[in-house]
Amino acid sequence: MKLTRRQILKGGLAAAGAAAAGRAGARERRQPPPEAVGMLYDATRCIGCRACVTKCREENKLPFERSADGLYDQPVDLSGSTKNVIRLASDGTRTSFLKAQCMHCVDPACTSVCMIGALRKNPVTGIVEYDENGCVGCRYCEVACAFNVPKFTWEKAVPRIVKCELCRHRADPGKSGPLAVANPACAEVCPRAAVVYGTRAGLLAEARRRIAEEPGRYESRIYGEEDGGGTQVLYLTARGFSFQQLGLPDLGRNAVPAVSESVQHGIYYGMAAPVVLFAAALVAVHRRGGTDDQE
Amino acid sequence: MATTETSPVGGRFVTPFVKLLLAIWALGSAVAVVRFTRGLGAVSAMNDGYPWGIWIALDMVVGTALGSGGFAVALLVYVLHRGRYHPLIRPAILTAALGYTAGATAIVFDVGRYWNLWRVPVAPLFSSGGRFGWNFNSGLLEVALCVMAYTAVLWVETAVPVLEGLEAGPPGRLRSLAVAVRPALERSLPVVLALGVVLPMMHQSSLGSLLLVATTKLHPLWHTPLLPLLFLLSCVGVGYAAVVIEATFSGAVFGRPLELRILRELAGVMAALAGLLVVVRLADVTLRGRLPLAFAPSLLSGFFWLELALTGAAAVLLWRRRRAGTPGALVRAAGLLAAAGALYRIDVYLTAFDPGNGWRYFPSVGEILISLAIVSVETMAFLFAVRRFPILPRARRPAGSVPARAAS
């Protein structure tokens, strides 16, 4: 055999590199489950009353975030005690409200990185669900989420990840349709139908209907239909007020974890690359007898 | 190739330096009590924007790079059969075992729900009715499993000199045990050594892949599909640098023979690696059209050039020292490469990471104290091990090696 260990190693590395390069970007686009549920937020209808923030707190048994004088519940961002928040955005002249909560991505980064599946996308509803029993508290989900949604209870000795789960605990199995699997408190209390709950397909139709009825009122695009691989929470914004000005990230069409997963799987090639490397290393070590003291 | 003769250094363990380390360990332990009773927020500056701080970026990501000397020297000695590097292997493996254990310890402090850690290696067996299992999309799962397995591998490799030390000790149960166990251990060594080369290649590259998913947060000068390659190259370079520094230190402090000839040769290897890192980094940024960002007047472009300058300077210095470097010059050049590698890794995990929304992070006193305490225990364990067990090359004067005291 003419091959030296070095050549085997180099060959293995080169193959792994080529595989990584060839496979990157080859990942197919994921589709939402047919019965996926979600929410539609219409920034042009929101009056910033924050009834949704208070009701979310109540129904999810989350503590208040008090102002310095203790008189107000005043959350400024999502946090370990706030799963839903209303922010004020500005484009320089005009202002608009923005409701922030988990986007329930079609192809989520948080579930892609979660080690043993504490965060998991429900295969039927598409809700991104959290199970603290499988969570080690590594917080990789926080690093991965482009929307900065998952939060951690830093002040607790027994901490957990906190994020919107679309009030799946308020589901009523006795009902039919979307209410059988979840029932977001925020949508229930909204006095202006600025946030509505339903199937993703139904919400897309509703969003298109609103745009078609008042084309002068809305930007013609629906945020979340394609953005970041698609989300199950969809957004409408006022004409001339961009989604980025509103505070939503510009993600393009591709899912956030598409590249990282492709590179990772490309390098490993279904564990073939490490196995080949191991075999090559074993052959190389054996050639020489291998033990520490008898080389 | 001759066997390397090794012997314990002996001498008193508790020196004034060790007393200082004990004091730091005590301070860190006090902070640890607060961390476990009052939560992470009570001692750390980490936050929802920067959920990973120095325990990850320094203790784990930089610490295991410094501990990669074990893998990098094993690659030379056992796979590429460059037997002349053998005198470096035992201290390098010990340093690696301690470095990886220190990193793993930092993880236990860092993760919020540490009592669930047991589930990670056994998730397929205890799936709680199919709820949990290994998620092979997760780079962190790969890192976690590999680091656990590799740490075990390193301790098996470290067990050889420990058992030898016990065999040479006074008769008793420990000695009989060592005599009984060592042959079986040595039979398993080829598999262990092969794992010891493959596992680090896997998880060191994956440590780079971890930040690939942060497409909107990691600065474009650092975010590249080549992150795994860059991390792999940097761990080998930093690992050799750590070996050079450690060997020179052991030579100077314990009067052990300094294999100056092989350290110089290693300097040539490190120079090539450092040069390759500079070329790959520049080519990557240029070919993907991101070079203009490096000329934008910002703090981050400064860090980018600082990394390149340090790595480039290390390459030049190491190349010049590869034939006639003094121990001091070699250590300075190796230190430069280690610093460059450490800076690159910290930049990827912290400096060039911006979650937006005005989030900021600077490590708290509590985080720093726990980090220092972990390093203190690691250092004490190293000092204890080389005094008690045959790790360092025996004091002798074969041709080509120079007593370090005289040389430095």
Image: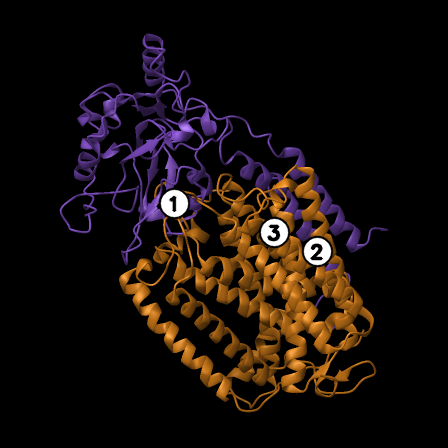
Query: In the depicted view, which residue is nearer to us: B165 or A104?
Result: A104
Left or right of residue B281, residue B300 in this image: left
Q: Quadrant of residue A78?
A: top left
In the rendered structure, the residue with mark 2 lies on which chain? A
Question: Residue B375 at what x, y percent from top left?
Answer: 49, 71
Give the label on residue B127, or none. Answer: 1
Q: Residues within 10 Å of mark 1 (few under 14, many from 20)?
A: some
Q: Quadrant of residue B285?
A: top right
Q: Which residue was labeled with disc 3?
A: B304
Question: Residue A269 at what x, y percent from top left?
Answer: 62, 40
Distance from disc 2 to disc 3, alpha carbons, whole Å, reads 35 Å
Give the label on residue B316, or none. Answer: none
Question: Residue B404 at what x, y percent from top left?
Answer: 72, 84
Picture mark count: 3
Q: Secondary structure at mark 3?
A: helix
Q: Secondary structure at mark 2?
A: helix
In the rendered structure, the residue with mark 1 lies on which chain? B
Q: Amino acid at mark 1?
A: Ser
Q: Judging from the image, what is the letter of the chain drawn in orange?
A: B
Q: Colour of chain A?
A: purple
Q: Amino acid at mark 3?
A: Phe
Query: In the depicted view, which residue is nearer to us: A50 or A245?
Result: A245
Q: Which residue was labeled with disc 2?
A: A281
Query: In the depicted view, which residue is nearer to us: A39 or B142?
Result: A39
